[in-house]
């Protein structure tokens, strides 16, 4: 029997509809892989479970050069195929998604460029990079292929923090005047606190201020004296050079509002101040990240004097209870990542945000080197402290 074009198309459509009806509405399946390194940064913030709560993602393989760590984590995650080398895994598995788990930045560029070459979207632990020029290259590689990559800024995604942002926009604390953030101020207080825990605080600062600052000025000291190139040292983990056991940084935002970040080695250690406060004309919004990182505590003081009042929970606050905090906070990010892939947009928790947060830390060091205010974006994309020590050695 001969079918004309219209009859053929109609018949094909009916067959397709029948096949869909017969098989049911099945969700699209994504294939995911994990890159870890048990001896070089481990598996930060349980990122190996990044896609575990998604019914439409199958995590199929894990790469880790450490044999015992590879075996242990593969069993925990429930993947059968393992590899000593991540490049071999990417080549053989050709995943749609990759979770890059190591906390240390030393190999982040290599991981991400290899994933971009394989055409994979993904989720990477923070800090994003160890050098702005490397970060620029990483972002350029994924943007060239229109790949979507998210970063583990998991406090910003929590429902209570998102609710707080909406309330601030609606005028809960009036007109925003400034933000004040602090690191954990533990043994890493100062420069290392800035690059490790400051990543979260500076991301929250950008979130509440509506974008990146346009300038930074900072004062950094070691044992009470102004830091010099001789004080530059490597962080206790492979995260690049740092300086200072006390950091006081000030950022200027386009609307005239300012933000501060402070971290100071002190005899009392971590006092639970890790977080950020947003000060407005009618009150203060306070966000604290408690020890154990299980959730966040958010409250407000609705007093224009910033005193003589009672701290209260946020009005109409969503529930903050999470049975498995690490996995559930990661799910907020991975849910958005997959939506970004399907909607062809930038993820809400993007590596571009990770680069912007890192630039804020580098601006602090650059201000120390330059001895004054520096403009953001930074013109020099190499690490300011590397350049400082090299120039001192050559002079």
Image (tube, rainbow, N blue to C red):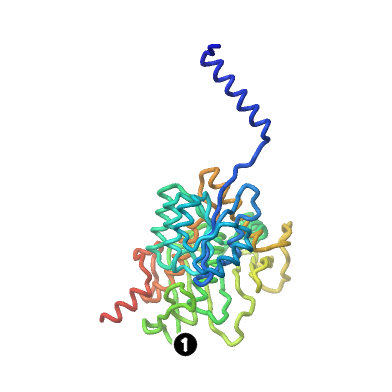
| Residue drawn at point x = 34 percent, y = 76 percent | 388
Q: Is residue 148 visible?
A: no
Image position, residue 323 (x, y; %): 73, 62
Task: Choose between 374 and 172: the one closer to the eye.
Answer: 374
Report the quarter where the N terminus lies.
top right
Residue 177 in which image quadrant = bottom right
| Residue drawn at point x = 55 percent, y = 71 percent | 197
Task: Choose between 372 and 72: the one closer to the eye.
Answer: 72
How many marks the image carries: the answer is 1
**Mark 1 closeness class: few <14, some 14–19, many ≥20 residues within 10 Å:** few
Report the quarter where the C terminus lies.
bottom left
Q: Is residue 133 visible?
A: yes
Image position, residue 155 (x, y; %): 61, 63
Residue 162 in which image quadrant = bottom right
Image position, residue 184 (x, y; %): 58, 76
Task: Choose between 81 and 227: the one closer to the eye.
Answer: 81
Relative placement, left or right, of 185 versus 313 is left
The residue that label 1 is drawn on is 224
Residue 312 in which image quadrant = bottom right
Position of residue 12 relative to residue 354, above or below, is above
| Residue drawn at point x = 65 percent, y = 60 percent | 327
Image position, residue 131 (x, y; %): 40, 67
Badge 1 element: loop
Position of residue 89 relative to residue 2, above or below, is below
């Amino acid at each position: 029997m001969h079918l004309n074009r219209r009859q053929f198309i109609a018949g094909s459509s009916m067959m397709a509809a029948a096949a869909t009806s017969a098989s049911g509405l099945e969700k699209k399946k994504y294939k995911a892989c994990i890159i870890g390194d048990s001896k070089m940064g481990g598996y930060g913030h349980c990122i190996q479970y990044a896609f575990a709560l998604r019914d439409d993602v199958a995590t199929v393989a894990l790469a880790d050069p450490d044999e015992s760590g590879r075996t242990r984590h593969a069993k925990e995650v429930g993947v059968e195929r393992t590899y000593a080398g991540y490049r071999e895994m990417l080549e053989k598995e050709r995943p749609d998604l990759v979770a890059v788990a190591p906390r240390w930045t030393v190999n982040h560029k290599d991981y991400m460029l290899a994933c971009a070459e394989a055409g994979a979207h993904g989720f990477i632990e923070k800090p994003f990079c160890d050098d702005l020029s490397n970060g620029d290259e990483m972002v350029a590689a994924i943007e060239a292929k229109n790949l979507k990559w998210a970063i583990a800024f998991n406090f910003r995604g929590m429902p209570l923090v998102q609710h707080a942002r909406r309330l601030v926009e609606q005028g809960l604390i009036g007109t925003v005047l400034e933000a004040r953030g602090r690191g954990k101020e533990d043994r890493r207080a100062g420069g290392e606190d800035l690059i490790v825990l400051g990543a979260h605080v500076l991301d929250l600062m950008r979130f509440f201020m509506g974008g990146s600052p346009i300038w930074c000025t900072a004062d950094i000291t070691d044992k009470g004296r102004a830091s010099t190139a001789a004080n530059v040292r490597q962080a206790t983990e492979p995260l690049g050079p740092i300086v200072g056991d006390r950091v006081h940084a000030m950022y200027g935002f386009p609307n005239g509002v300012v933000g501060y970040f402070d971290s100071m080695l002190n005899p009392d250690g971590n006092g639970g101040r890790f977080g950020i406060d947003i000060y407005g004309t009618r009150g203060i919004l306070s966000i604290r990240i408690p020890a154990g990182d299980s959730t966040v505590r958010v409250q407000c003081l609705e007093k224009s004097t910033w005193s003589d009042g009672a701290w209260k929970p946020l009005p109409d606050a969503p529930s903050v209870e999470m049975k498995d905090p690490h996995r559930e906070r990661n799910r907020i990010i991975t849910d958005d990542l997959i939506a970004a892939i399907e909607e062809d947009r930038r993820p809400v928790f993007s590596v571009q945000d990770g680069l912007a947060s890192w630039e804020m830390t580098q601006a602090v060091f650059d201000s120390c080197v330059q001895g004054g205010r520096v403009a953001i974006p930074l013109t020099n994309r190499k690490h300011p402290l590397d350049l400082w020590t090299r120039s001192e050695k050559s002079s």
